[in-house]
Image (spheres, rainbow, N blue to C red):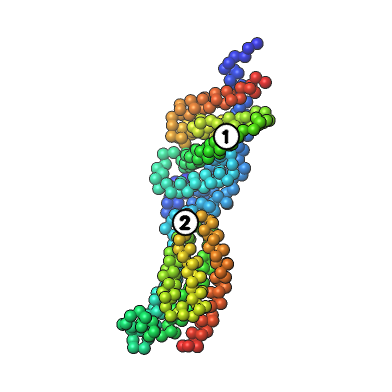
Amino acid sequence: MDDRELIGRVLAGDPSAERALYDAHVDRVFRLVYRMAGDLDRAQDWVQETFIRAFQRLPGFRGESTLSTWLCSIAISVALNGLRKVRRVRDREVALEHATPAGAPRAEPDPDLRTRLREAIGALPDGYRAVFVMHDVEGYTHEEIARVLGVQPGTSKAQLFRARARLREALADFARD
Amino acid sequence: MAMDSDQHDEQMDQRIRELARSFNPPPPAPREVMWRAIAARRVATRPAPQPRWVPWAAAAGVLLAFGIGIGRISAPGGPARGTASTEVRRVNPTAYRMATLEHLARAEAFLTLFRASLERPGDRRLASATARQLLAGNRLLLDSPAARDRNTRLLLEDLELVLAEIAQLSPGSPREDLELIREGMERGDMLPRLRTAVPVRAASNQGAL
């Protein structure tokens, strides 16, 4: 069954079509969202939110992009909003930690390259991070990313260029080794 | 020999790309868990078909009013025209017992279904609406001669608390609210008391009739 037929059945109120649509796309959406979230509970919540929104907005889907791309654009929007909330919470926690009297400087083990990269990706601005994860991690093309994020392919390329530059900068110590 | 900057960047990018593939490696998607949550929320946001117990509860509400009406009409001297206190004295107590019996049976069925559907947020709105209907009947009975019997009054008073809590529920109510209601029902032995009360009263009503 193609997407058009599936959408028609969902809009006609067929619950089995909703499940079929979900089954057809959930793995791709979950992979992308999990890469952004890095946490199973959070990823589950965001994927659920993605499909809830998708079913609600399906009557307005005009088929200008593929259903898969449309779902990914909702997923990225949900994930970026979620990350902003996570960051706000984390910032408050960090502020509280800093408010406590500092003892001796914490001796932290020197993180290896993988850990440092993970931190550096996590520290990227949301737009850069989305493009980097989609292109360099999940293998989306710039055209696909542009459709998902609603930008020009050139913007996607520019953001990837800047994201990589930031990562190189963050990992400069390792490059010298 | 100094490495060309572009070449250096390219090598670094290549290394980063290789390492990045292990960035947040996703586990297999927990499809069923997520689908259950999605389906539950879809049901909650859809204009849901009424569960079987809602029309039944509404019908029983009519029965309750009918029972009280019978009591008034069958009272010596016909329909009461006096003050509330004289009206109460004239009512046939059998009608109140019938109405009480119907009400308690309905409450028992409702609470049984409610306890079984606690996990479905979509049912909470319907449960709340039904609880409000039952609450109205419960208060009528508490103000009626049916509540002169001490055991009946205590049961109706405890039932009122549970129904009032359920009536406050909404689809977004936190899980703690549900747990409090469940604990309240269990602490007060609400369902066993209702189940015990109904057949006893049914038997006594049949005898009276």
Q: Chain of mark 1?
A: A
**Can residue B148 be seen in the rendering of this structure?**
yes
Q: Is residue A79 visible?
A: no
Mark 1 neighbour density, 10 Å: few (under 14) some (14–19) many (20 or more): few
Residue at 61% across, 27% down: B16
In this figure, which residue is indicated by the disc labeled 2? B171
Q: Nearer the viewer, residue A170 or B32?
A: A170
Q: Position of residue A104 (x, y in %)?
A: 66, 31
Where does label 1 land, which residue?
Answer: A98
**Residue at point 58%, 30% (across, down):** A120
Give the CA separation, mark 2 to mark 1: 39 Å
Judged from this view, the residue extending furthest toward the left is: B81
Q: Residue at x 54, y 80 (%)?
A: B199
Q: Quadrant of residue A107?
A: top right
Answer above or below: position of A86 versus B43.
Answer: above
Amino acid type of the residue tagged 1 in the rendering: His
The three-letter amino acid code for the residue at tag 2 is: Pro
Q: Chain of mark 2?
A: B
